[in-house]
Amino acid sequence: MKIITYQPDESGLAYAVGTTLDRFIKLKQGDFPFASGELSQLLRDIALAAKIVNREITRAGLSNIGGAFGQTNVQGEEQQKLDVIANIRFIRALSKGGEVCAIVSEEEDSVIDLQNSSGKYVVAIDPLDGSSNIDVNISIGTIFSIYRRKTPAGSPVLKEDIMQAGREQVAAGYVLYGSSTMLVYTTGCGVNGFTYEQSLGEFFLSHPTIHAPKTGAIYSVNEGSINEWEDGIKHYITLCKERGYSARYIGSLVADFHRNLLKGGVYLYPATLKNPSGKLRLLYEANALAFIAEQAGAMATDGVQRILDIVPTDLHQRTPLMIGSSEMVTEAGKMISAFTEKAMYS
Ligand code: AHM
Ligand code: MG
């Protein structure tokens, strides 16, 4: 009888393309010697909720869950039915798991204290980002940040557990509901992307160890607001055009960010007259993507300072955001700072 020896694939099995998300999370847990498995379980809970939300999104056109819900959220934005459904699904998943003590959500005015004081983690989440694209079958996303609470487990949740700078994140990720559904996340040891295989109901590793190109030829900005911008950003966009860069703007932050992360490019949402602090929210939009960007070798600033260094003072605080390929973010920042200084001394 002839016996042949099985040859594992080139990456030594562990992080091979095609590894299921569950298995990957379990293998990665080994990178942290004292990990108790709670963060791993929390990531699995988020992945499960993402599958459920994905199911709702893919059949939205058929099941009368498109359109407005009839109420506005704390930011005064009209809530869509799917915003509300996604919020419920994620909160339910996070509250059932037992690892989380509190949640900050774009759709909720206040912090949700889960009355689970033994939970070690705080989650900030935008359950469904890109609301204006929900009804027209264009990519939308979920964005999440995970923090370890500052106060000891077993005690009440306090402000210091919630209002942490982005650099304190222990994990962050996004789900992109696009032409395929992807979950991309980091626990601070690189960024990995998983593609959802609908018929099997599993996320599989498809984009291991994502490295963002240092520069690119794509700029993503809502140019319709140009008359509301300061001079620095106007000049940067003029420069992008002179260089013949492509303009690509979906209006779903996750989708625009994801494309630029893989292809090289910069996403900009500057301060405008209407939104002097920018539009995007620090706690559950900018911070998560900034953590992922840095882990992939890209960058995120508010035009002047690193997003991850901003200490929040308000739950739904907004920030300007320049995020993407490091050389492009740096160049945009220099132009913004130069014009800000010029304005100060003129
Ligand atoms: P939302 O959280 O209400 O969906 O708003 C955030 C979205 C981002 O996904 C997107 O990049 C941006 O708002 C688009 O805003 P605008 O329509 O002003 O360009
Ligand atoms: Mg949002």
Image (spheres, grey):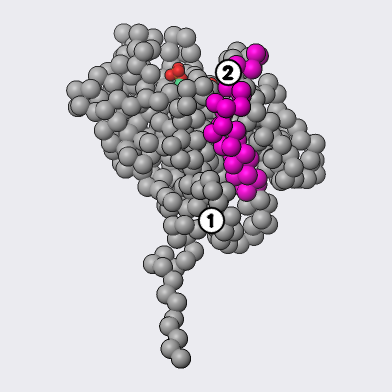
Residue at point 31%, 8% (across, down)? 346
Residue at point 46%, 35% (across, down)? 178
**Dot placed on the residue nearer the N-terminal end, 1 or 2:** 1
Q: What's the residue type where badge 1 is placed?
A: Thr
> Could you tell me which secondary element the residue under label 2 belongs to?
loop
Q: Is residue 226 left or right of residue 282?
A: left
- Is there any visible trace of residue 89 in the rendered image? yes
Task: Please tell me how crowded label 2 is: few (under 14), some (14-19), or many (20+) other residues with Cα within 10 Å.
Answer: some
Q: Is residue 72 left or right of residue 206?
A: right
Farthest front residue in view:
62
Q: What's the residue type where badge 2 is placed?
A: Gly
How far from the left and from the top, in percent, is residue 313? 61, 24
Query: Does 45 lie within the magenta span?
Result: yes
Q: Looking at the image, which is closer to me, 248 or 291?
A: 248
Residue 67 badge: 2
**Where does the magenta region start and end?**
42-71
Q: Is residue 179 left or right of residue 218?
A: right
Query: Does 176 lie within the magenta span?
Result: no
